[in-house]
Image (spheres, grey):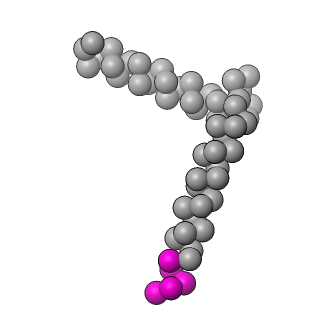
Amino acid sequence: MTITTSTKIRKSRSEKISDSLDPRSDRFNFELWSSEVRQQMLTALQKQLNSRRT
């Protein structure tokens, strides 16, 4: 597999994931979206907790 082919595959996967996370897309995947949002919320809460400790 060449670098160009690998890059195209990654870009294709990235676009599919983007479509899956877009609520306006026909390919919207609620499970994937909620998993991503959960991780973002946990990260934000952890940062807030850490900033209060210092």
Give above or below for 21 relative to 40. above
Can residue 22 be seen here? no
Please give the name of the residue rendered at 60% of the width and 46% of the height, measured from the top-left corner. Answer: 36
Quadrant that contains the N terminus: top left
Query: Residue 42 is drawn in which quadrant?
Result: bottom right
Q: Position of residue 47 (x, y in %)?
A: 52, 70
Q: Main secondary structure of the magenta part?
A: helix
31 lies left or right of 12: right
Query: Residue 6 is drawn in which quadrant?
Result: top left
23 lies left or right of 3: right
Identify the magenta region.
50-54
Give above or below for 32 relative to 39. above
Give above or below for 3 relative to 38. above
Query: Residue 19 is drawn in which quadrant?
Result: top right
Give above or below for 14 relative to 49. above
Please give the name of the residue rendered at 25% of the width and 14% of the height, measured from the top-left corner. Answer: 2
Q: Is residue 8 magenta?
A: no
Q: Position of residue 28 (x, y in %)?
A: 71, 29
Name the outermost residue toward the bottom.
54
Q: Position of residue 32 (x, y in %)?
A: 64, 37
